[in-house]
Image (spheres, grey):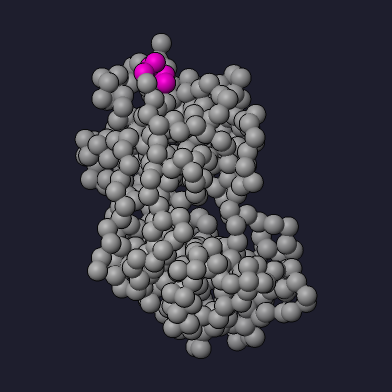
Amino acid sequence: MTERIVVLGAGFAGLWSAIGAARTLDELGVGADRVEVVVIDRSAWHSIRVRNYEADLGDTRVALDSVLDPIGVRRLEGEVTGIDVARRTVAYAAGGASRSITYDRLVFALGSRLAHPSIPGLVEHAFDVDTHAGAERLNTHIASLAGGVSAPGQSTVLVVGGGLTGIEAAAEMPGKLRTAGVMSPRVILADHAARVGAGMGESALPVIDEALHALGIETRGSVSVAAVDPTGATLDGGERVAAATVVWCAGMQAHPLTAAFAVERDRLGRLPVEPSLRIKGLAAEFGAGDAAWFLIDGVHTSVMSCQHGRPMGRFAGHNVVCDLLGRPLLPLKVDWYTTILDLGPWGAVYTEGWDRRVVSRGAEAKRTKELINRQRIYPPRSGDRRAILDAAAPTVQAPPVRFG
C-alpha cells in the first residue's frame, strides 16, 4: 500500500519541503509506488513574493510543474479549507467542488498573509504587494494615474507600514510614478512607531533615513489610519491625507488554518515546532516557513522570511520522510542572521547579526540584494532532475556574499 506525504503550500517553505522529501526518498531508493509526495496549492506558480514591490514582475514566478514534474511530485491545485488531524485528512476546494485527501505525514506550509485590521475602507480601497495579483493590481493602477482626471492627491502615494516591506515598496514608488508620467510625484511613508524603520535597529536607521531623503520620500511616525476611501486616508485624530494610492504594508499573520491544530500558537498565529520541524505535541504533522516558529539558533525565534523559510522547508521535507520510514531526524540550526533591505535606486543596506550591524551599504549592498532576489532564492529552472533534488539537501547555506 502506498503511503502519502502531503505538503500544504508551494511558497518558499512548501516548495522546498516537497523537493526535500523527493530528494530523501530518491537517496534512500524509495519509489513513488511506496511513498508519494503531493503538494496542494491554490496556484500553479511558485511566487518570488519578496520581489512584489518591484516595477517589473515578469520574472517573479516559476511554474510549479517545471520543478515538480521532473522529480515526480504530484501537484493538486486548490484552496485548502480544512485539516482533520484525527482522521489525517485535508479538505480543499478545486474547480467549484469540495475534495479531500488522506495523508500519512503532513507538512503545513501555507505561509502568512497581510493583516487587515477592521479599518473602514481598507480592504475595498487600499493596495498591497502581499501577492503577485495584488502587486500587479498596484502597478496597473500606478500606470493609469497620469491619464486620470486631475484631483487633489492624484500624484500622491501613501504607504502605510514602515517595516521592510513598506520601505522597499516606498523606495520603488517615485520611479514607478515618473515612469507612468506622473508629474511632481509625492510619496509618504508612515508608521505607527515613532520612527520609520525602527525595527532595523540603530546602526541601519541613519542609512535608511539618508536613502529615503535622497529619494524624496517623506516619512511620518506615530501615525495610525482610521479610514481609507478612494481619494485618500483619514488618520486617527481626524487629519486627512489626499492620496489616489494608499498601499497597506502593516503587519503579517500566519495562515488562519493554523487554528486547525490543538496547540498554543504565538501572537502571529504561528505553530510551535521542534528543531526537527515536527509540530510540538503531534505525531504526524510538521510545520515550516511563516506559519511555524522555533528558536532557530537556540536563542532567537525564527522570522517570517525566505531566509528561514527555505532551510525550514528543506529540513522538514527530509525529516518527514525519515519519520515515516523510521529513520533519525535532523535538527535545524541556523547560527547566522542577515538583513538586506532594498532602498530602490539609492542602493541597499546589508546588516549582520540580530542587532543588525551595518556591514555594507549603497551600490555594494544592492549587488548582494539582487543576487539574493534574482538567483539565490530561486529553485533550479533547468528542468534537470538531479539539479533540482541536489538543491534541497538538508544543509544550511553560508551567508550571502558581501561585496566591497
The residue at 46%/59% (across/down) is: 355
Q: Position of residue 135 (x, y in %)?
A: 49, 62
Look at the picture and state if 219 lies above or below 191: below
Whether residue 221 sits left or right of residue 44 in the image: it is right
The answer to whether any part of residue 197 appears in the image is yes
Q: Position of residue 347 (x, y in %)?
A: 36, 73
Q: How many marks?
A: 0
Indicate whether 36 appears above or below 141: above
The quadrant in which residue 93 appears is top right
Quarter of the figure that contains the C terminus = bottom left
In the image, is residue 329 part of the stretch drawn in magenta?
A: no
Q: Compared with residue 20, is residue 376 higher up or lower down, i.e. above or below?
A: below
Q: Residue furthest right?
A: 237
Please name the residue shown 27% across and 47% down the image: 381
Whether residue 110 is visible to the viewer of this picture, yes or no, is no
Outermost residue toward the top? 1
Residue at the (31%, 38%) spot, across then down: 395
Camera-side residue of 315 and 92: 315
Extent of the magenta region: 323-327
Residue 45 position within the rendered picture, expressed as x and y whole percent measured from the top left: 41, 47
369 and 29: which is toward the camera: 369
Left or right relative to 196: residue 231: right
The chief SS type of the magenta part is helix
Name the residue furthest bottom.
184
Of the 4 image quadrants, the one containing the N terminus is: top left
Residue located 38% across and 59% down the image: 352
- From the top left corner, tell me how far across and down residue 17 is, in percent: 40, 35
